[in-house]
Amino acid sequence: MISIRRQLMGLGFAAASSLVAMQAAHAMNGPQAITIDGGPLGQLELSGGADGYGYYINNAYPGAKDHGAYMGSGLVELQKTTGVLQYTIELGSTSGAFALGTQPSQATLSTYRTGPLVQGYITIAPPNSPVTVSAGHLASLEGYEATVSWYNPTQFTTALWYVQNSYSTGVEAALTEGPVSATVLFGDGNDTGVWNYGQALLSYTIDSNNVANLYGAMNFGRTGANAFYYGGGTVGSGNALVNNQMIGAYYSWTGGDLFQKGDSLNVVPEIQYVYAKTDHLAGIDKSTSNFGAAVFGDYSFANTPYSLGGWIEYENSQGAYSWFIGPDSEAIGAAAAPTWQYKDLFARANVGLLYLLNNKQFSQGGSFGNNGTNKLQFTGTLQAGVLF
């Protein structure tokens, strides 16, 4: 789950330029940093945001609330992006984004082992060097979607995002040479406290409108069921989520002036495959996998405060493990979000549908509705916030 602002720092100027081009076509403009003269600390950048939302779910899970209102993300970030020694400190909560087909939750300051510290790392950037090194609590290199909802086409995320890492503690190195950038990260994947997980991202900027990305991840050891797993306690039955190998790719195309001068469109297709081999000591008694594919889109209307984001997805789980909706699940989904944004304020209506193509495991809880047999679930939210 890529944190776009951190990627702009970690991948260097060439990669940053490509991501700026991608972000310019997003249906929402993210926080715009305030420059601060830090005196002996150098030039600092302060940014952040907060949002809340009300939701309604048709065919909610048995016993779950079908409506409510929650605080979403609330973040304050301080960065030093110049000089040899750079750093990022981000405090707050990132619970505003949630996967379509799952239950939303209230914001919390204990999502990670670091408590309210969402990101906190230092970066060494030697002068005229194509290599930078970062260490601390870092965002994942996996996937296109971000953990913070206002960087995504809609508040809802896909099944691809659901099985990816979020933030974890580790060491990262980035190399940029011309249009190519490569980043590797080693640490405690999924914020488990067990240092055995590696991630990699390779990006190629074809031109200002086309960027190709390939990512992968692997557990090089074994993470036991008693290890910590984000803010939800121990790993427990989530063993395949922390003992797996992943590979995926996404491609960003940006175009403009489609219907009138100044309009912009960003289209991003993504595919992903994650596999967990048989490991009886880790509690995985039979190999299991999950395949996901999605196409994201953002359209900004010129000279207006309005835009439209959305996506379609397909997911297919193989084996007895519950990667997403349930064991052996197969589903298609779609989401859309018309958005209004004026300077620092934004509001958007998010609507999404998830349809189960495969209901073989309904008896194991992978179902919708109070009777446990519905295949279709509708989710809608009204989201509003402020960015700075």
Image: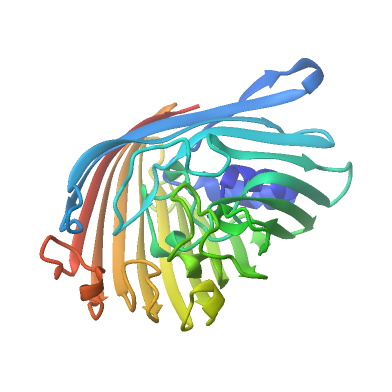
Residue drawn 78% across the image and 22% down it: 41
Of the pair 64 and 23, the residue shown nearer to us: 64
One can see residue 372 in this view = yes
One can see residue 342 in this view = no
Residue drawn 52% across the image and 30% down it: 48
In the picture, residue 333 is in which quadrant?
bottom left
Residue drawn 78% across the image and 23% down it: 42
Apparent side of residue 21 relative to residue 232 in the rendered image (left or right): right
Check the image and report above or below for 296 versus 70.
Answer: below
Residue drawn 57% across the image and 55% down it: 192
Residue 288: image location, x then y, percent: 46, 80
Apparent side of residue 209 relative to residue 269 in the rendered image (left or right): right
In the picture, residue 292 is in which quadrant?
bottom left
Of the pair 263 and 284, the residue shown nearer to us: 284
Check the image and report above or below for 350 versus 59.
Answer: above
Residue 160: image location, x then y, percent: 44, 64
Apparent side of residue 300 relative to residue 128 in the rendered image (left or right): left
Apparent side of residue 132 relative to residue 112 in the rendered image (left or right): right
Check the image and report above or below for 353 versus 138.
Answer: below
Residue 47: image location, x then y, percent: 56, 28
Check the image and report above or below for 129 versus 85.
Answer: below
